Image (cartoon, rainbow, N blue to C red):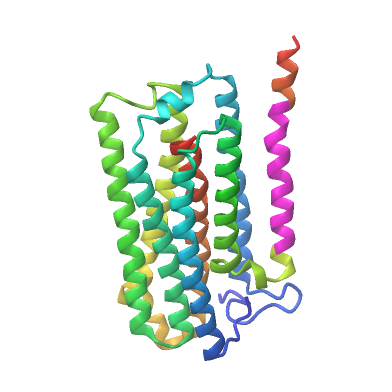
Amino acid sequence: MEVPYIIKEREDTGLINSKLGIWIFLASEIMLFGGLFSAYIFLRLAAPPGDFARWASELSVPLATVNTLVLISSSVSMVMAWASLKLKDVSKYKMYMGITLLCSLIFLIIKYFEYTAKFSHHIYPSSSTFMAIYFTLTGLHGIHIIGGMIVMIYFWLPIGNKMWETQPELFTNRVEVLGLYWHFVDLVWIFLFPVLYLL
Amino acid sequence: MSSEHSTESIQEHIRVYLMVFGALAVLTVVTVLASYLDVSTSEGIFLALIIASVKASLVAGYFMHLISEKNTIIWILMLTVLFFFVMLFLPLISYTDQVHI
């Protein structure tokens, strides 16, 4: 069965169904991360004065700053991959999608070093309320990175991008929808960075 | 964003993407530098959240094309923001209630 309105927009919504679908999914994601940000605020309010700031000083600001720049770079390369398909330049698409994948891999590697540095100092989620919410938020965000990477790998490899040969418009729309998800993951990190590392 | 784009409009988009990328990189550095300012905790939180909101608006507006997106999506997001604030402030009511017990 063919999914309707995934190439041309529906007249009533003015949107393709896949774009409407991803935005509704992202709305649910706002509530998911919003709930955890809310938890962070109330845990911080209930903590002894200075407790969160003291535990946050255990984190590496330089590494997190590099990771922020890496994730912003991945976001711009993702949108460039989509723009390349719009310009019908599939080789540039593959290059930009490859850069996005590389950036997301670098992000995870840096995160791995951050986590293992904490574990080597015997700092775990159970160590403090701050560390519990830090590992929960960054762990959930990391799972989103991995999820995005799985889809990116599929669209980057011939098994996924062969659709460009037969249905270029549909493939371009799929990449746009993936991009919307990826920019949201970047957007969450934009708030996580100051909230966890700098305040 | 509509599926119809001319080559010129896409190339214009690309120029905008690169400018937004530059702005995001600069704002990231500004966020870090602002955290070293000698201000109170509440001022620091306010400053950090303002900069993060500007960065988030740039990503949502330009990379996610919200500035030229259909009203259907804008309404879904406005509804989500409303529910988000309800969720955020509901526990606050219980928190202030406990203070007065």
Relative vertical location of residue B48 with respect to residue A90 in this rendering, above or below: above
Q: Give the range drawn in magenta.
A: B74-92
Relative vertical location of residue A142 with respect to residue A173 in this rendering, above or below: above
Q: Can residue B99 be seen in this view?
A: yes
Q: Is residue A156 magenta?
A: no
Give the quadrant of residue A153. Answer: bottom left
Relative vertical location of residue B11 with respect to residue B78 in this rendering, above or below: below
Does residue B51 appear to the left or right of A52 in the view shown? right
Residue at x 39%, y 63% (from the top left corner): A73
Q: Between residues B22 and B91, which one lies in front from this camera angle?
A: B22
Residue at x 36%, y 71% (from the top left corner): A97
Task: State the image coordinates of residue B66 (x, y, percent, origin top left).
Answer: 64, 67
Task: State the image coordinates of residue A194 (x, y, percent, origin top left).
Answer: 49, 42
Does residue A106 appear to the left or right of B61 in the view shown? left
- Residue sticking out furthest to the left: A120
Q: Does the magenta stretch include residue B87?
A: yes
Task: State the image coordinates of residue B68 (x, y, percent, origin top left).
Answer: 66, 73
Quadrant assignment for the C terminus of chain B: top right
Q: Is residue A29 visible?
A: no
Residue at x 31%, y 73% (from the top left corner): A157
Does residue A126 appear to the left or right of B45 in the view shown? left
